[in-house]
Image (spheres, rainbow, N blue to C red):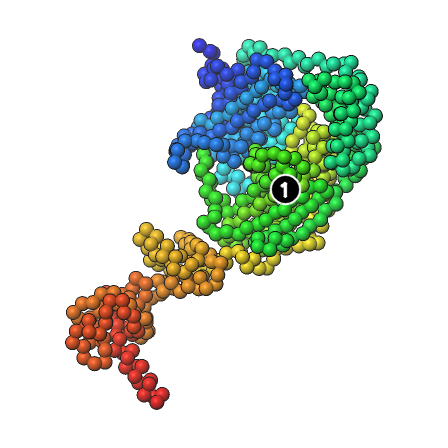
Amino acid sequence: MNKIISHTINIGHQQLTFETGKFARQSNGAVMVRFGDTMILATAVVSAEPKKDYDYFPLQIEYREKLAAAGKIPGGFLKREGRPTDKEVLSGRLIDRSIRPLFPDGYRNELQVIVSVYSSDKLNDADVIGACAASASLLVSGVPFNGPIAEVRIGRINGKFIVNPSIQELKESDIDMIVAGTSDSINMVEGESREISETDMLDALKFGHAVIKDICKAQLEFISKMDINKSQFVPIQEDVELKNQVNNLARAKMKSIVHSILKKDERSAAKNNLLNEVVSSLQINEESIPKVQEMISNIEYDAMREMILSEGKRLDGRGLKDIRPISVEVGLLPRTHGSALFTRGETQSLTTATLGTSRDEQILDGMLEEEPRKFMLHYNFPPFSTGEIGRIGTSRREIGHGNLAERSLKNLISQENDFAYTIRVVSDILESNGSSSMATVCAGSLALFDAGVPLKKAVAGIAMGLIKEGDRVAILSDILGNEDFLGDMDFKVAGTKDGITAFQMDIKIQGISIEIFEKAINQAKDGRMHILKIMDSVIDKPRTEISAFAPQLIKIKIPIDSIGAIIGPGGKNIRQIIKDSGVEDITIDDDGVITIAASAKEASDKALQFIKGITAQPEVGTIYKAKVKKIVEFGAFVEILPGKEGLVHISQLDIKRVEKVSNVVKLGDVFEVKLLKIDDKGRLDLSRKAVMLEQSTTKQENS
């Protein structure tokens, strides 16, 4: 039996415990981590041999939440967990982005880390604890992982930073920041904020990194109690002779391509031509072509980086801080509720905003209790946006980019004027060469303005890059796709003219210093202000009216004790009102506020009439249209308002004497009656005779 080893430290007001030796002992590394009553098991399994035909690191991170962990049974027909939710995908991406840069270049062993939440106290989100568990499992497994890393969530309430705030505390916090890193540096940041300053963001990072250092130290102390056989990574030996031959043929020509060809597609074509030329000149066999292709990519990597560091010149001819040309158009799709086309260089987003009713709210079936979502943003990246052929579907990347754009915008939608619509924003990327997620933020802000959504301020986003060689550093504003691929950092910042609303940073090297980060974030602010100025020149506030094609929402308030009468038994009455009036939806809040959603005024007016009829209180002396519901010997029971009936006595049915009720009225007959009296028990005494006498008198006076 394996020896059980554990180690505990204090983080904030909770204990963080790492334990191994009890669970999943056939994996290469398994660690159970506990924080409060939240428990996460991370397992790492690595292949014995590298995948020699792979040109990438086959790392797979899976994050799964067991609903039993929170005492819940899954919804749906199958009653079991199925495909990962967006929350699980996003949490898995956070772990992947923190860990992937810390493996040696050329490592090709297949590696799978599965992070499973087995207990949830519903107070602490398991995502950041899952990253710490994943790091510890890799350390225990002995793979060549240059960790540990740790991940923490930072909040701020009343100016005070909090590490791993509870779900309730996050609702009060103006920052929700996830920071990951090693003892020496930060390598991943993601989150949202309520228009914080650049200084506030830096302070939050410093606070988070101090805690990260403590958790990394705890992991090292944890594994020091074990005898771990760490595998040694031996990189595949390069073919030096072939490399020299390729260098001699391609280096000067690649430098010329990088310096002189500014357009992405032309540069890509020139690179392919160079590859074919080298392959032909050296008579390379088919098996070695991928090797030559990689060598040429490495030459391109060196040439691009050297040009930026030495000359301050970029692939498309811009300087380090220059923003590509931007064009903006709104209201271009006539039948959508709001639309915008945002084009920046060779990146283009066509975005729509759609207004719906409460029926359109998204109900999430997850481990944590979540309120229905009234604001959604979805991001689509079709293959034609990069001139390629590919499958259409929702990838993990699309979920991640959409989530970042959604976080950038959602907190700016005003709640003060009671905008009751459910809002869906959809960004379709029609062209892509650098930061389509930030183009989505800009286009989303414009589309919301065009739809008349009360967005408090315009929001813009920009992606920053980094080239670092030793002490030489270049920070790039508004990066291209190749600058992202060949660079060392992808740092996205979104915000208004007054502060930052969302951010995401990935580092491909070991990490960066706070000083570099500070320079990047301040340079990002300058770029953001430039983009906002262009957007504001086209539309700088929400339209005063929503689209004629959007549902029209009408609100009225009824007495709380009338809610039951409107709804009816099992919702019978409200369903009937929706059916008879032709409105799209009717919702009733606990405070008696009724919202009617209709695409036509005639339908909403009809629904209002029904509702007012149900809630109206009978008044003595008022004349009503009555419908006969029941006939008895002494009179007829009629309905004067929905659910309100009274008696027309036989003596009040006609001016003349009535011998038999059925001689005068039948079931379903409609006629006017006057309310004579409401007795102590609330019974209504009605008279048809009184109406007939009044009509007779009026007729005589007019004649």
Residue at the image position 16 percent from the left and 76 percent from the top: 659
**As drawn, 242 above or below 68:** above
Residue 134, percent across and down? 54, 23
Quadrant hosting residue 395: top right
The residue pinned by badge 1 equals: 429
Q: Is residue 501 above or below residue 6?
A: below
Q: Is 355 situated above or below 641?
A: above
Q: Total marks drawn?
A: 1
| Relative image position of residue 137 (x, y in whole percent) | 54, 19
The image quadrant where one finds the N terminus is top left
The quadrant of the image that shows the C terminus is bottom left
**Residue 97: image x %, image y %?**
61, 28
Is residue 101 in view? yes
* 198 sits to left or right of 400: right
Does residue 680 appear in the picture of this structure? no
Question: Disc 1 residue type?
Answer: Ile
Secondary structure of residue under mark 1:
strand
Crowd class of label 1 (few under 14; some 14 to 19; many from 20; radius 10 Å) = many
What residue is drawn where x is 19% and y is 74%? 663
Report x, y in % for residue 60: 56, 24
Q: Residue at x 72, y 36 (%)?
A: 480
| Residue drawn 50% across the image and 53% down it | 420
